Image (cartoon, rainbow, N blue to C red):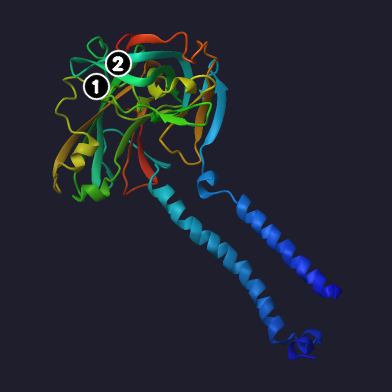
Amino acid sequence: MMRWVFNVAALGAAAVVCYGMQSSKPRYKNLIAPIPVHGSMVDKVETRLFDVHIGKVVFARELKVTEFGKQKTLTTDGLWAVVAADVAARDRTTRVGAATWLGPTGLRFHQTERFSSRSDLPPISVSPGLPQRGLFLFELPPGEVEGATLVFSHTVFSALDSQANIALDRVPLDSDGTPLSVVDVYDLDRPI
Amino acid sequence: MSVSDAAALDPQDGGPERKWRRRALWGLVILLPAAILEMGYQQTSFYLQNNDLVARDAEPLTDVHFGGSDWRLENMQTMKDTSSLRIPRDSAPVFVDFTVKIGDADLEQAWLGCKIGLVDESGRSWLPSYVRNSRVDDMATCNSTVFSGAKTGDTVKIRETFVIPKDALETVVPTVGLGSERPYYLRFKRS
C-alpha cells in the first residue's frame, strides 16, 4: 500500500516539475534577443558597433520639410517626437538602422517611414572617427511621452547583438498630459 | 525470478541487457560530440565564408591572383583641396585604383560579396562612401564590375572612394575581400 502511494506521489511530483519546466521555458526569440546596454540622456551609450548620445528631443504638432525641392507639411493625430542623436562608429563602418520609442505603457513605436531617404534619417551610415548627428522621428500619442525609453540598434532585429536603451529625462506636462514645450510647426531643415 | 533479474545478479556474465546498457553509454561519448560538431559545422562554415578573417599580404604594383583574376593595386591618393566636396570637417577623401585582369569570368560567383576597404594600423576599417566628384564619375567599382559582363582576358579599371579622418591617412592600407576566397582577404602594403 505504501509503495503504491509513493509511486503516485512520485508521478505527481514529476508531472508538476515537467509542467513548471514547460511553462518557464524561454522562447527562442528570448534566447536570441538583443542585449540591452542601459543609459540616460547624459550618457554616451556604447554598443558593440556604435556609440550613441541623445542631444535633444523636440515635440511638435506638425513637421515642415523640403523633399525633392518641394516643401511639405506632415500632420499627425498625436505628436511628433524629433530626437537628435550623435552616433559614432566604433571600429568599422556600420549603420544605425533602427530606433524604437518604448512608451511607459509598454507600447512600442518604430521610427516613422513617412519620409523619403535623407542622409540624416535612419539607416544612418557612420564610419570610425567621423561621428554624425542623426534624426529619429516618431509619431506618438501624448500619453506615451513621459517615462519613455529610446532603443537604438544596428538593424530592426539584431539577434544577440547589443542595443542602446536610453531612458529619457522627465518632460514637464500640462494638465492633459501634453508636453509644455510642444511647438506647432518644426522645420526639419533647420539645424538642431 | 525473471530472466533479466537472474542476469543482473550474475557478476560474471552481465547478460544482454547490461551489455547493451554499457554500449549505449559508451555510444553517448561518441554521439554527443558528433552531434555538437554536426550542428556547429553549418554555422562555422557560414561564418568563415562571410567574413574577411585571414589577411594575405600583397605588394602594390604587382599582379596578385585572387578570386580567379589578377589584381594589381595601381594607386592610392587623396586631395588637398576638399572645398568642393561635401565631406565632414577633419576628413579626407581617398581614391584607390585597381587594374584587374579577368580570369574566371563568372564574377557573380567568384566576386560574390566583393568588399574593398581601408584599414589603419589600429584595426579601424572603412567601407567605400559616395563622393560627388569628377574623379569618380563614370568609374567602375568592384560591385558594378560584377554585373558589367566582363569576359576572360578583359582588363578592368576599378576605383573605390573613401572618406576617412585625416589622422588615419598616414597608416591606411587597402583590403580586398571576395566571396570565393573567404575567409582569406588581400591586404596591400603601402608603397
Which residue lies under the disc numbered 1?
B131
Q: Secondary structure at mark 1?
A: loop
The answer to whether residue B74 shows anywhere in this view is yes
Residue sitting nearer the eye, B57 or A97: A97
Q: What residue appears at the point 54 percent right and 32 percent down from the top-left corner?
A: A36
Q: Secondary structure at mark 2?
A: loop
Q: Is residue B4 left or right of residue B99?
A: right
Q: Which residue is mark 2?
A: B87
Does residue A23 appear left or right of residue A112 in this picture? right
Front position in the image: B164 or A40: A40
In-front residue for pair B87/B92: B87
- Spot the residue most to the front: A176
Q: Amino acid at mark 2?
A: Ile
Asked if residue B170 lies left or right of residue A69, the reply is right
Question: In the rendered structure, are the residues bearing label 1 and label 2 in contact, judged by CB atoms less than 8 Å apart?
Answer: yes
In this rendering, the count of numbered labels is 2
Find residue B166 and report its horizontal and vertical position in percent.
37, 16
Q: CA distance from mark 1 to mark 2?
A: 8 Å
What x and y, as percent, mark residue B180? 31, 49
Question: Residue B48: percent from the left, percent from the top?
Answer: 42, 48
Which image quarter: residue A94?
A: top left
x 19%, y 45%: residue: B102
Residue sitting at 42 percent across and 20 percent down? Answer: A129
Based on the displayed image, in which of its 4 quarters is residue B23 positioned? Answer: bottom right
Location of the N terminus of chain A (image quadrant): bottom right
Q: Quadrant of residue B90?
A: top left
Residue at mark 1: chain: B
What amino acid type should be assigned to the residue bearing mark 1? Val
Where is residue B176 drawn, in percent x and y?
A: 32, 38
Quarter of the image with the C terminus of chain A is top left
Report crowding for label 1: few under 14, some 14 to 19, many 20 or more residues within 10 A (C-alpha): some
